[in-house]
Image: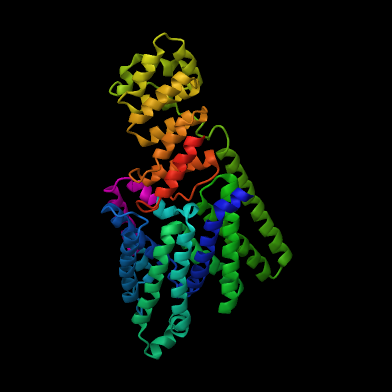
Amino acid sequence: MTDLLQLMAAPFAACVVLVGIHAYLGLHVIQRKVIFVDLALAQIAALGGTFAFLVGVSPHGTSAYFFSVGFALVGAAIFALTRMRQERVPQEAIIGVVYAAALALAIQVADRAPEGAEHIKETLVGVLLWVRWSTVFKTAAIYALVGAMHVAFRQRFFQISFEPERAYAEKRWIRLWDFLFYGTFAFVITSSVAIAGVLLVFSFLVIPAVIAVLFARRISTRLAIGWSVGIAACLVGLVASYRLDMPSGPSVVTSLALALVVAALIRYVLSAERRKNATLKALAGVAVVAAGLLGLGVFFTSGKFMHVVHEHDWEQQPQASGSTAGDDPFWVDLAAACGGDPACGARRLVELADWHLLARRGLASPDRDRRERTVEVLAADGRPESLDLLAAAAASEKDLLLRLDEARAIAKAGDRRGLGIAVELLSDEIPAVIRDDAHQFLVESGGQDFGFDPFAPEGANREAIARWRQWARAR
């Protein structure tokens, strides 16, 4: 329980802050019938962050934030200008086009950047699990300013969203107030996407507000329902992600979606003339869905699906003659004889008088697959001589993921050199995705994180890395 509280306290606080502002904005969005404006603005902000990433700006630094805000404000201006009293083309269609264009541009920009695919993934699912308290407080301050502005001008904002014809009749500056609405939205979205990603931000905006609209008419009641449902779904999603070892952001999205399904069923029963029949139908539907989910759960956790035991036919076949892995007949024969089983490979390897030389050749091979197989075999062997070879190979291994695999293998054999190798992968010059993987491994090994943030700006983790090094030496 203590570990759960330590790991999930800051992410839960971030969720509460996000729900607080997005459930309110969601009421405006639903009333305006521009459901996907959040998704579009979030993607435009993500495009700004991706562009900053391409030009060498840290994706979590202040400069990247202003890149994202600038792009999002341009999107806000587009949406304010495209709102028409008499629409020939629904504004939702324009929003969809802008979203698709922003996503396409983000993919193209990311394709030019190192680790671009990982950055795109990060913008979609966010880094909620790694949010720091300083980020939570800063985001809460930004949202408080936005909230204060909406309270001060609430009559204008609510009139334009809920009574647009009256606003037009009174000759309000519709586009100006629209721009102010979308502009404040842009500041909120930019901060939200950096923490939670596009998918979770969209869910926070729409799902609590939809549930609130199902059960209430008054704005205050809708807000209370939206906030309550959003916070409860966050709690359930984060606890499930911890217990089931799942990504935190998608887990919260799933929890919100399930909350919407439950709310829709309750609303269906309450509004039915024959509630008993409606209840039986709802329960039958729940049973069918539950059975389907249970079947999928059994399949996805079965040995046939799990990667650790699942083997494709093509993985068993020798590599093409053009591959450098085929140049060494020993490793081809070993793979064929053992079927990819590292323990079998270790037994056969150490039976040979020149196994030490063969292992060094495998670790020095230009073929990444052969080096990976050699690491697996030596890790399965686990003798001091094999660990010495792995430690020496890790010092010169260019593939950082494979170096981390070597560190894991050494550490799991009880050799502290593996922890030291993993700690060095926390350095600023290492890509953030590798730092993240190395940090997760170290947290699993040590049960603490020393305040390290894999996505922090350069130099921010200096003290945390020093503490990790001290910890590794003391093991």
Quadrant in which residue 37 is drawn: bottom left
8 up-or-down from 426: above or below: below
Question: How are the residues colored?
Answer: rainbow
67 up-or-down from 466: above or below: below
The answer to which of 24 and 162 lies nearer the viewer is 24
Work out which residue is located at the far bottom of the displayed protein and give it: 170
Name the main secondary structure of what is drawn in magenta: helix
x, y (%) of residue 284?
A: 67, 54
x, y (%) of residue 46?
A: 36, 59
Q: What residue sits 30% from the left and 53% below the top? A: 53
446 up-or-down from 338: above or below: below
The answer to which of 311 and 42 lies nearer the viewer is 42
2 to the left or right of 112: right
Quadrant in which residue 97 is drawn: bottom left
Q: What residue sits 36% from the left and 19% below the top? A: 360
x, y (%) of residue 150?
A: 45, 79
Over which residues does the magenta segment extend?
A: 98-121
